[in-house]
Image (cartoon, grey):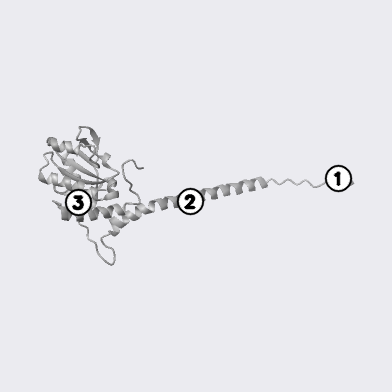
Amino acid sequence: MTNESQKMPVDITVHTLPQQEGAAALLEVQSRTRLGRLKMLIVLALCAAPVIASYLTYYVLRPQHSGLFTVKSFGELVQPQKPMPDMSATTLRGERVPLSSLRRQWLLASKSGGACGKTCQNNLYVQRQLRETLGSEKDRLDWVWLISDDAPLDPLLQKRLLDPNLKGFNGLRVNAQQLNAWLQGEEDQLYLVDPLGNYMMRFPPNLNPETAIKAKRDIDRVLRASASWDTPGRDKP
Protein backbone atom coordinates (compact mmCIF):
# COMPACT_ATOMS: atom_id res chain seq x y z
CA MET A 1 0.00 0.00 0.00
CA THR A 2 1.37 3.41 -0.97
CA ASN A 3 1.84 6.29 1.38
CA GLU A 4 -0.82 8.29 -0.51
CA SER A 5 -3.50 5.68 0.04
CA GLN A 6 -2.68 5.55 3.72
CA LYS A 7 -3.33 9.27 4.00
CA MET A 8 -6.87 9.02 2.45
CA PRO A 9 -9.76 9.40 5.01
CA VAL A 10 -11.74 6.31 5.75
CA ASP A 11 -15.17 6.45 4.02
CA ILE A 12 -17.86 5.11 6.41
CA THR A 13 -21.44 4.69 5.19
CA VAL A 14 -24.14 4.20 7.85
CA HIS A 15 -27.39 2.86 6.41
CA THR A 16 -29.41 2.80 9.63
CA LEU A 17 -29.51 6.52 10.38
CA PRO A 18 -32.38 7.45 7.98
CA GLN A 19 -34.49 4.65 9.45
CA GLN A 20 -33.83 5.91 12.97
CA GLU A 21 -34.76 9.45 11.98
CA GLY A 22 -38.00 8.21 10.33
CA ALA A 23 -38.95 6.22 13.40
CA ALA A 24 -38.34 9.22 15.64
CA ALA A 25 -40.48 11.42 13.39
CA LEU A 26 -43.27 8.81 13.42
CA LEU A 27 -43.16 8.64 17.21
CA GLU A 28 -43.34 12.43 17.39
CA VAL A 29 -46.38 12.49 15.08
CA GLN A 30 -48.10 9.78 17.13
CA SER A 31 -47.35 11.67 20.34
CA ARG A 32 -48.82 14.89 18.91
CA THR A 33 -51.91 12.98 17.71
CA ARG A 34 -52.48 11.50 21.17
CA LEU A 35 -51.98 14.90 22.77
CA GLY A 36 -54.43 16.48 20.31
CA ARG A 37 -57.04 13.82 21.02
CA LEU A 38 -56.56 14.25 24.77
CA LYS A 39 -57.06 18.01 24.46
CA MET A 40 -60.21 17.46 22.36
CA LEU A 41 -61.62 15.04 24.96
CA ILE A 42 -60.91 17.53 27.74
CA VAL A 43 -62.70 20.31 25.81
CA LEU A 44 -65.69 18.02 25.12
CA ALA A 45 -65.83 17.02 28.79
CA LEU A 46 -65.77 20.66 29.91
CA CYS A 47 -68.56 21.52 27.46
CA ALA A 48 -70.69 18.55 28.50
CA ALA A 49 -70.13 18.95 32.24
CA PRO A 50 -72.77 21.69 32.80
CA VAL A 51 -75.39 19.70 30.89
CA ILE A 52 -74.63 16.50 32.80
CA ALA A 53 -74.52 18.37 36.11
CA SER A 54 -77.86 20.10 35.55
CA TYR A 55 -79.59 16.84 34.62
CA LEU A 56 -78.04 15.00 37.56
CA THR A 57 -79.07 17.84 39.86
CA TYR A 58 -82.67 17.88 38.78
CA TYR A 59 -83.42 14.31 37.75
CA VAL A 60 -81.11 12.29 40.02
CA LEU A 61 -80.14 14.31 43.08
CA ARG A 62 -83.48 16.13 42.95
CA PRO A 63 -83.21 19.75 44.17
CA GLN A 64 -86.06 19.24 46.63
CA HIS A 65 -83.57 17.30 48.81
CA SER A 66 -80.93 19.86 49.63
CA GLY A 67 -79.23 18.80 52.84
CA LEU A 68 -80.16 21.19 55.61
CA PHE A 69 -83.72 21.66 54.44
CA THR A 70 -86.24 20.02 52.16
CA VAL A 71 -88.04 21.79 49.31
CA LYS A 72 -91.02 19.80 48.05
CA SER A 73 -92.02 20.32 44.44
CA PHE A 74 -95.61 21.38 43.84
CA GLY A 75 -95.84 19.58 40.51
CA GLU A 76 -95.67 15.81 40.16
CA LEU A 77 -92.54 14.50 38.48
CA VAL A 78 -93.26 11.99 35.73
CA GLN A 79 -91.16 8.85 36.03
CA PRO A 80 -90.03 7.70 33.60
CA GLN A 81 -90.18 10.73 31.38
CA LYS A 82 -92.25 10.32 28.22
CA PRO A 83 -90.63 11.45 24.96
CA MET A 84 -92.63 13.48 22.45
CA PRO A 85 -94.27 11.15 19.90
CA ASP A 86 -93.55 11.36 16.21
CA MET A 87 -96.88 12.76 15.03
CA SER A 88 -98.28 15.53 12.85
CA ALA A 89 -100.39 18.46 13.97
CA THR A 90 -102.44 21.27 12.46
CA THR A 91 -102.03 24.92 13.42
CA LEU A 92 -104.97 27.23 14.08
CA ARG A 93 -104.42 28.57 10.56
CA GLY A 94 -104.83 25.08 9.08
CA GLU A 95 -101.15 24.40 8.32
CA ARG A 96 -99.74 20.90 8.79
CA VAL A 97 -96.60 20.74 10.95
CA PRO A 98 -94.77 18.01 12.86
CA LEU A 99 -95.30 18.06 16.61
CA SER A 100 -91.51 18.03 16.90
CA SER A 101 -91.55 21.66 15.74
CA LEU A 102 -92.30 22.48 19.39
CA ARG A 103 -88.94 21.17 20.57
CA ARG A 104 -85.97 23.33 21.65
CA GLN A 105 -88.16 25.27 24.08
CA TRP A 106 -89.60 24.51 27.49
CA LEU A 107 -93.34 24.00 27.04
CA LEU A 108 -96.21 24.63 29.44
CA ALA A 109 -99.02 22.72 27.78
CA SER A 110 -102.74 22.18 28.23
CA LYS A 111 -105.05 19.87 26.32
CA SER A 112 -108.79 19.94 25.63
CA GLY A 113 -111.38 19.83 22.90
CA GLY A 114 -111.92 22.80 20.61
CA ALA A 115 -115.09 23.88 22.42
CA CYS A 116 -112.80 25.15 25.26
CA GLY A 117 -115.11 25.58 28.21
CA LYS A 118 -114.48 27.43 31.46
CA THR A 119 -111.66 25.14 32.65
CA CYS A 120 -109.89 25.30 29.29
CA GLN A 121 -110.07 29.10 29.19
CA ASN A 122 -108.79 29.31 32.77
CA ASN A 123 -105.83 27.10 31.82
CA LEU A 124 -104.98 29.30 28.85
CA TYR A 125 -105.09 32.38 31.07
CA VAL A 126 -102.90 30.75 33.74
CA GLN A 127 -100.42 29.53 31.12
CA ARG A 128 -100.00 33.00 29.70
CA GLN A 129 -99.70 34.63 33.13
CA LEU A 130 -97.12 32.09 34.31
CA ARG A 131 -94.99 32.78 31.25
CA GLU A 132 -95.20 36.53 31.75
CA THR A 133 -94.14 36.26 35.42
CA LEU A 134 -90.85 34.64 34.39
CA GLY A 135 -89.48 38.04 33.39
CA SER A 136 -86.23 37.79 31.45
CA GLU A 137 -86.54 33.99 31.34
CA LYS A 138 -89.94 33.93 29.64
CA ASP A 139 -88.46 33.59 26.15
CA ARG A 140 -87.26 30.12 27.13
CA LEU A 141 -90.81 28.85 27.62
CA ASP A 142 -93.77 28.60 25.23
CA TRP A 143 -97.36 28.04 26.27
CA VAL A 144 -99.17 25.47 24.18
CA TRP A 145 -102.79 24.47 23.69
CA LEU A 146 -103.15 20.97 22.24
CA ILE A 147 -106.64 20.51 20.78
CA SER A 148 -107.78 16.91 20.76
CA ASP A 149 -110.76 17.05 18.37
CA ASP A 150 -112.15 18.80 15.30
CA ALA A 151 -114.66 20.97 17.14
CA PRO A 152 -114.66 24.56 15.82
CA LEU A 153 -113.14 27.25 18.00
CA ASP A 154 -115.11 30.21 19.24
CA PRO A 155 -114.36 32.93 16.62
CA LEU A 156 -113.51 35.53 19.30
CA LEU A 157 -111.15 33.14 21.10
CA GLN A 158 -109.46 32.17 17.84
CA LYS A 159 -108.99 35.82 16.92
CA ARG A 160 -107.34 36.51 20.26
CA LEU A 161 -105.05 33.50 19.98
CA LEU A 162 -103.98 34.45 16.46
CA ASP A 163 -103.09 37.99 17.49
CA PRO A 164 -99.48 38.54 16.33
CA ASN A 165 -98.82 40.46 19.54
CA LEU A 166 -99.52 37.32 21.59
CA LYS A 167 -96.02 36.04 22.30
CA GLY A 168 -94.93 32.48 22.97
CA PHE A 169 -98.23 30.81 22.08
CA ASN A 170 -98.72 27.67 19.99
CA GLY A 171 -102.13 26.17 19.27
CA LEU A 172 -102.17 22.78 17.54
CA ARG A 173 -104.82 20.18 16.72
CA VAL A 174 -103.49 16.67 17.32
CA ASN A 175 -104.69 13.10 17.37
CA ALA A 176 -106.46 12.51 20.69
CA GLN A 177 -105.27 8.93 21.15
CA GLN A 178 -101.61 9.77 20.57
CA LEU A 179 -101.87 12.90 22.70
CA ASN A 180 -103.37 11.07 25.68
CA ALA A 181 -100.77 8.31 25.40
CA TRP A 182 -98.08 10.99 25.74
CA LEU A 183 -99.54 13.56 28.17
CA GLN A 184 -101.19 11.18 30.58
CA GLY A 185 -103.39 13.05 33.02
CA GLU A 186 -106.63 14.96 33.33
CA GLU A 187 -107.68 17.62 30.84
CA ASP A 188 -107.73 20.32 33.53
CA GLN A 189 -104.05 19.81 34.37
CA LEU A 190 -101.03 21.63 32.98
CA TYR A 191 -98.00 19.75 31.67
CA LEU A 192 -94.32 20.72 31.59
CA VAL A 193 -92.19 19.47 28.69
CA ASP A 194 -88.42 19.99 28.44
CA PRO A 195 -86.61 21.29 25.31
CA LEU A 196 -85.78 17.73 24.26
CA GLY A 197 -89.49 16.92 24.06
CA ASN A 198 -89.69 14.92 27.29
CA TYR A 199 -92.91 15.24 29.30
CA MET A 200 -91.48 15.43 32.83
CA MET A 201 -93.95 17.15 35.20
CA ARG A 202 -97.68 17.77 35.63
CA PHE A 203 -99.39 20.27 37.88
CA PRO A 204 -102.56 19.73 39.92
CA PRO A 205 -105.92 20.55 38.27
CA ASN A 206 -107.62 23.94 38.33
CA LEU A 207 -104.72 26.22 39.18
CA ASN A 208 -105.72 29.51 40.78
CA PRO A 209 -103.63 32.62 41.61
CA GLU A 210 -102.40 31.04 44.86
CA THR A 211 -101.45 27.62 43.48
CA ALA A 212 -100.06 29.13 40.27
CA ILE A 213 -97.36 30.78 42.40
CA LYS A 214 -96.29 27.32 43.57
CA ALA A 215 -96.21 26.08 39.98
CA LYS A 216 -94.04 29.06 39.04
CA ARG A 217 -91.47 28.04 41.68
CA ASP A 218 -91.12 24.64 40.04
CA ILE A 219 -90.74 26.23 36.60
CA ASP A 220 -88.12 28.62 38.01
CA ARG A 221 -86.18 25.64 39.36
CA VAL A 222 -86.06 23.74 36.07
CA LEU A 223 -85.10 26.88 34.17
CA ARG A 224 -82.24 27.52 36.60
CA ALA A 225 -81.13 23.88 36.42
CA SER A 226 -81.01 24.01 32.61
CA ALA A 227 -79.55 27.52 32.28
CA SER A 228 -76.10 26.21 31.33
CA TRP A 229 -77.30 24.45 28.18
CA ASP A 230 -80.70 25.89 27.22
CA THR A 231 -81.03 29.27 25.48
CA PRO A 232 -84.09 31.27 24.41
CA GLY A 233 -85.76 30.62 21.07
CA ARG A 234 -85.68 27.76 18.59
CA ASP A 235 -82.86 29.17 16.46
CA LYS A 236 -80.28 27.58 18.72
CA PRO A 237 -77.76 24.91 17.78
Tell me, yes or no, if residue 99 can be seen here: yes
Labels 3 and 2: the sequence-earlier one: 2
- In contact (CB < 8 Å): disc 1 and disc 2: no
Q: Residues within 10 Å of mark 1 (few under 14, many from 20)?
A: few
Q: Amino acid at mark 1?
A: Ser
Question: Which residue is identified by label 3?
Answer: 202
Q: Residues within 10 Å of mark 3 (few under 14, many from 20)?
A: many
Q: Amino acid at mark 2?
A: Lys
Q: In this rendering, is residue 63 above or below 81? A: below
Determine whether, in the image, residue 120 is placed left or right of residue 63.
Answer: left
- In contact (CB < 8 Å): disc 1 and disc 3: no
Question: Which residue is identified by label 1?
Answer: 5
Q: Amino acid at mark 3?
A: Arg
Question: Which residue is identified by label 2?
Answer: 39
Using the numbered discs, state the Cα–Cα distance from disc 1 to disc 2 in whole angstroms.
Answer: 60 Å
Residue 74 x, y percent position in the rendering: 20, 57
Residue 79 x, y percent position in the rendering: 23, 53
Check disc 2 and report its element: helix, strand or loop. helix
Tell me, yes or no, if residue 2 can be seen here: no
Residue at far front of view = 165
